[in-house]
Amino acid sequence: MNGLGCFAKTKKIKSTSAKGPIYGRQVDNKVNDRENRWNGQKASPKTSHERPRGDRNVDGLEEAMKLKHRGPDWSGLYQHGDSYLAHQRLAIVDPASGDQPLFNEDKSVAVTVNGEIYNHEELRKKLVNHKFRTGSDCDVIAHLYEEYGEDFVDMLDGIFSFVLLDTRDNSFIVARDAIGVTSLYIGWGLDGSVWISSEMKGLNDDCEHFESFPPGHLYTSKSRGFRRWYNPPWFSESIPSVTYDPLVLRRAFENAVIKRLMTDVPFGVLLSGGLDSSLVASITARYLAGTKAAKQWGSQLHSFCVGLEGSPDLKAAKEVADYLGTVHHEFHFTVQDGIDAIEDVIYHIETYDVTTVRASTPMFLMSRKIKSLGVKMVISGEGSDEIFGGYLYFHKAPNKEELHRETCHKIKALHQYDCLRANKATSAWGLEARVPFLDKEFINVAMSIDPESKMIKKDQGRIEKWILRKAFDDEERPYLPKHILYRQKEQFSDGVGYSWIDGLKAHAAKHVTDKMMLNASYIFPHNTPTTKEAYYYRMIFERFFPQNSARLTVPGGASVACSTAKAVEWDVAWKNNLDPSGRAALGVHLSAYDAEAPLISNVPSKVIDILGCSDGSQTKRARVLELSRRLKHRGPDWSGLYQHGDCYLAHQRLAIVDPNSGDQPLFNEDKSVAVTVNGEIYNHEQLRKKLVNHKFRSGSDCDVIAHLYEEYGEDFVDMLDGIFSFVLLDARDNSFIVARDAIGITSLYIGWGLDGSIWVSSELKGLNDACEQFESFPPGHMYTSKSRGIRRWYNPPWFSDSIPSVPYDPFVLRHALENAVIKRLMTDFPFGVLLSGGLDSSLIASITARYLAATKAAKHGGKLHSFCIGLEGSPDLKAAREVADYLGTVHHEFHFTVQDGIDAIEDVIYHIETYDVTTIRASTPMFLMARKIKSLGVKMLISGEGADEVFGGYLYFHKAPNKEEFHHETCRKIKALHQYDCLRANKATSAWGLEARVPFLDKEFLNVAMSIDPKSKMIKKDEGRIEKWVLRKAFDDEERPYLPKHILYRQKEQFSDGVGYSWIDGLKAHGADHVSDKMMVNASCIFPHNTPKTKEAYYYRMIFERFFPQNSARLTVPGGASVACSTAKAVEWDVAWKNNLDPSGRAALGVHLSAYAMCKSPVL
């Protein structure tokens, strides 16, 4: 495959400071906050802090990150002079080594590609004198260019958009596939720059003019113009005369499907139950067993369908799936679900065309569900109706000449309609859609057939697409049941449920007045909307894409049932009923509209009842949805929204336990209690046994919460063993409670509005422009609306000031940690362990590997997967590899460069929501690693956070003066974990839809570990007791070793050090490049709270303030003196530390083997 989303520019844009919002344009004197949010801009453009600029062009990174949804697996950026190639990768073929940009042997030719080259293996055989760096299908492109020049494009069999840069003469070429299955746009700046992007949003505020890149064309910098490379015979529109041969047509289509089974990741087929998707599914199922894909993922095909309850598609698709024996996944949505998604759909699909928006919305919702199952590629049936005249209006084609020309026009326009929908509705969630009906070779066969054979003739029993149906009407080995093979055409937006379109019209009618329609031609002179539904979509589009260039990318003209404007002339009745639904083909569709249906329908009262919202509540609902979408990265699998009066519960789900039925909010039996939860309840099965009189709606671990509340009231919280943040609403008295887990492993914030409202969110960005005041919700606490206050529910013995005295028992400690790990192996999805090679992560990996086979989690494979990241040659990489080899894990080692990390800093601060130096240093490698891990289909990780706090593992504990000070410091550190390591582990992984679980912070394990007499934890070099000695000793088993001795007793490395010492040095140098001495002089005036003491800290603070400028936000970040991660109190343990306040472990002078020399560590 490769990366969905390429971007390039050929001249450097001049840097500008304090740049305004990326998508924002002022509308009614208000900034469009939603647009700002998309690429991580703060809600308000007003700021006194200039955007930091690096050695690379910040604009290029910024624009590329707008396409991150298309390529969630990795980012690549290449610079040569003033030319940049940026890429967001969706890894489908060779995920391990195919990151882009790709190069020829000497790196003189670089290319970024969005697409798949199906004949890459044959092409490699033509390039025998070339050496390839990867197994990526797109790796052939740079080499083909070397060998054949720009004419190589016609050799490619696949779907693609690419930019190729030849550094030898600074020339470049841009090309797009034959039909435009992949999306591509080109723009020009006033400064002479040329910009290329897979979506408009990568261009829309950097170009004076931009447009859709024409399919089947290439653009060269040498000619500064376009030329067509795809010139098939049917383009002339002359009438073909080849006699129809069903076997030739069948063979051509089977070949088109088979070549699209090229994948190294799980895949499936979209199955609506109509002819086209059913044929694709049938052929795939028939030939899958003989492909490489079957060897990797099994020979049973997965199929997917979406619809309203009782829709035609759901019933037909289920029947086809049963016939073919596929593993079928049926997704339901409501009209309200679809309406809630409309803004997102228009933002992603980048159109206001009514047909496309209607059909894209169910596909958009379905794609999200499909991706949540770990699937990355789907095969779909687009294109057949255009080739064979399958739309119902073709019944009225007057002759074969008109039919053929209409099919030609429809195919040529596919990139503006169905291809655009299929590509962007799936890419919005990091899925790739492949469309065999638009295979070049198949189109050549199908479009050469005499169109007389395609004509619809009811008197002869020939319905639409008769020649396609006949080609697969095999009596001996049927492809499909007869009634499916000859089922009447349903447009996708009709087939998902007829009330879908009715609901959209009703919704639009509530938002667009008759008065607005009177002025439509003045407000929108180009492509003037003629219905309220069209006007509604246009308003949304113009907010996201206000430039004239953007509106010109959307086609217009009269249409009925998806026809071109020319075909409307085929029936005089159509001129008065210009609706794109298939039902508008009067006298053709069984459920055709009444011929006298008005253009702008009145709102049926029954639809209002379905939607359940008045105008006022819809406005509030839209606001809640807008804020909830800011957390979509945390829960990419589904969205939920529940409203009761003026209370709203919104949820973005990451499905790990019971993915099929555990969508939130969750309810009790009569839905009087609703709850949204972020977390995992590890003892949910035991709790269900206490709730024998309750009925559960799902198998979700969180489903117990509403029922426990019914049974025990708010005191049930202490019964929960897990990690959680939740909001529970009791609709019977409109009361609610909010609670957060004991240590704060899940993140949570609470805010208050001037209107008396209370807002709760997993991240600051869900509150930061909705509340007058907000703060971090304290761990181990709950808030109740009845008391209007926060109280502590978690009160373990170690919270007191008393010093514990339980004698150390290594076996008790070992057993407690093993139990903590085992209970965290509760998952319905692939998982792994983070393995740095240090003691903590190595022990977690060892215990997991030892007990995995005996757990339900083993169904995802008996071998444990482990993950590590570092700079080339870093201490962690070496140690982790050794531990992985010892434990026999499937080990994944990810490398990053200092520049990769620096490029990610802004994203890291936006997601982690802190300016704390230690946390940012450590979060960045974890953030990069989490992205790579998610690309492998993993959803959950077990990690080693917390051990250093519990056992005094940080190197500064060497200087603890006595056991009392030692114990008090561990207590302080654990209580503050939610501001540091828990915040990092939660948010760096959640940024990519991963969940981190931390056994060292298990409640029961903490009770054991924190009851040990701290004298046993004290570090005593003269007795051979290094940091965390009690933990090491507990797992020092001579008979069944958990780890090699030298790993078990390896010195502590902080994560930000262990990934490579030059990482911190590089960050300091980068900070020094962007913060002047003069700026540091004024630091206390600019930042009076938590004044940064170093240039690195000042740099991070500038970025944080741009994203989160409110005073409440800056107060959520802790401050105070620290050395090597100590609290301010512990700095007093060594007088030398007061002059060397660096959080790196190397700052513990005389302790770490690689400690800094004082003279080399200036404060600034």
Image (spheres, rainbow, N blue to C red):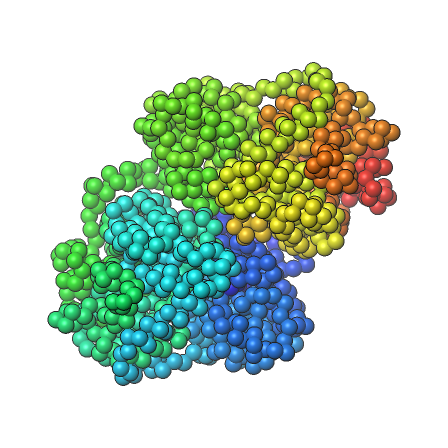
Across and down, in percent, residue 681 comes to 50, 31
Please say if 1009 is above or below 533.
above
Corner quadrant of residue 1155: top right
Q: Is residue 1012 left or right of residue 521?
A: right
Q: Is residue 718 left or right of residue 239?
A: right
Across and down, in percent, residue 66 comes to 51, 55
Report the residue at 31% width, 60% height from top. 278
Across and down, in percent, residue 707 comes to 40, 25
Corner quadrant of residue 973: top right
Report the residue at 65% width, 47% height from top. 888
Q: Is residue 933 left or right of residue 426?
A: right
Report the residue at 29% width, 47% height from top. 308
Report the residue at 65% width, 53% height from top. 894
Across and down, in percent, residue 1145 comes to 76, 39
Q: Nearer the viewer, residue 563 or 829?
A: 829
Please say if 713 is above or below 1041.
above
Q: Nearer the viewer, residue 709 or 1117?
A: 709
- Regarding residue 240, the answer to whether it shows in the image is yes
On-image quarter of the C terminus: top right
Corner quadrant of residue 758: top left
Q: Nearer the viewer, residue 965 or 91?
A: 91
